[in-house]
Image (cartoon, rainbow, N blue to C red):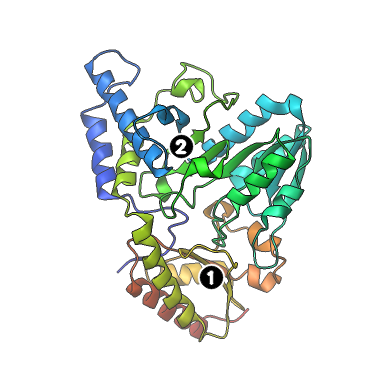
Amino acid sequence: MCHYLDNSATTKVCRAAAEKAYTVMTETFGNPSSLHTLGIRAEQELTVARRAVASLLGLNPSGADLSCITFTSGGTEANNLAIFGAAAANKRLGRHIVTTAVEHPSVLEAVKQLEREGFELTIVPPDARGDYDAHALANACREDTVLVCIMLVNNELGTLLPVKDAVSLIRRRSPKAFIHCDAVQAAGKIPLKVLSLDVDTLSISGHKLHAPKGVGALYVKRGVRLVPRTWGGGQERSLRSGTEAVPMIAAFGEAIKALPAPAVQMPRYATLCQKLETELASIHNVVLHTPASVVPYIRNLSVCGYKSETLVHFLAQREIYVSAGSACAKGHDSHVLGALHLPSEQISSALRISLCADNTPDDIDAFVHALKEAIASLAHT
């Protein structure tokens, strides 16, 4: 039996989304820019999905807020469109960028590229547990700060960053700053009202929400200007030219509609996390890395004396699937755990458990049992 506990890397596509993608590919397959009936139906599929994304973000799905949603190929493209688009639009106002040390690589590598192009970059570290203080984030900003990137939920530790409080402080300290939020690991699991966050852009990804890979979205606040990264036919209000991937986008909308409400999901996650932490407490090799402000569906732990890669393969042989950290790291040591200045032994032996609404106590039992088996049978490094 498969026990999948790597939902921060990707999720299983839900049946409703898979069926919707197939239907659109075989029946509503027109180009949404075409003026004939099949084109109009394809355009209608985009509108339905856009409404679903708007609802997910706490926006009005039937009003002008729909124009704030731009579909992309995923979270990485959404982050890059926001970061490079904002930098190009606002570079005359200043050249200073602020971000956190725990951002996803699609944010960190983007701002580092801007640094190579002449921007000045300040990277704010977390405290020893992985938490952030809103004042520390704001104090890193200056009068010439033009771009700030703060993720909402960290993909490795599960840290819930104080975005709303930080944005309020940043707006007063650096009124010219454009603020982007990567909400890929938050959307669909915690309550999300993008207007109350007061960010300029916010990114989400479909394959973290039981939609297919290859689709995401970028929220762009009304009145905010981005310079496009892709030029062409003017689709997506000229922010992201190119024929829209209608099957993936329509499936994205269906996956969102099929999600249980956060109020239903969160208690389930809390119960499973409590069970996990209680059972791990009896294993002396295990160290949990738990920020004070943490979501209940991501947990990071180290199994001291055992390499992450070895443990991941051992568990996978028993159809238990976890990760060693961000899937984008591809075996490299975690920059997130490195930012906590953890001992190298803990960084090299880290595992991430990430849940979805389909997980059960049996998944936790299987993981803990197999982990104990691994510790008993594998060579200690």
x and y, in percent, of residue 17 in the image: 29, 44
Give the spatial CA distance, label 1 vs label 2: 35 Å
Does residue 28 show up?
Answer: yes
From this viewpoint, which residue is outermost toward the top? 35
Tell me the quarter of the image containing the C terminus.
bottom right
Is 238 on the left or on the right of 42, as rendered?
right
Characterize the local packing of mark 2: few (<14), some (14-19) or many (20 or more) Cα atoms within 10 angstroms.
many
Q: Amino acid at mark 1?
A: Thr
User: Residue under circle 1?
Assistant: 310
Between 45 and 166, which is closer to the camera in this rendering? 166
Measuring 39% from the left and 39% from the top, which residue is drawn there?
53
Q: Nearer the viewer, mark 1 or mark 2?
A: 2
Measuring 33% from the left and 39% from the top, which residue is drawn there?
253
Tell me the quarter of the image containing the N terminus.
bottom left
Between 254 and 59, which is closer to the camera in this rendering? 59
Measuring 41% from the left and 27% from the top, which residue is drawn there?
64
Does residue 334 show up?
Answer: no
Q: Amino acid at mark 2?
A: Ala
x and y, in percent, of residue 155 in the image: 54, 56
Say what secondary structure mark 2 lies in.
Answer: strand
Up-down relation of residue 95 to residue 294 (above or below): above
User: Residue under circle 2?
Assistant: 217
Between 322 and 118, which is closer to the camera in this rendering? 118
Cβ–Cβ under 8 Å for marks 1 and 2 = no
Q: Earlier in the sequence, mark 1 or mark 2?
A: 2
Measuring 33% from the left and 69% from the top, which residue is drawn there?
360
Number of numbered discs present? 2
Q: Quadrant of residue 349?
A: bottom right
Up-down relation of residue 46 to residue 55 (above or below): above
Numbered tag placed on residue 371 in the rendering: none
x and y, in percent, of residue 122 in the image: 76, 46
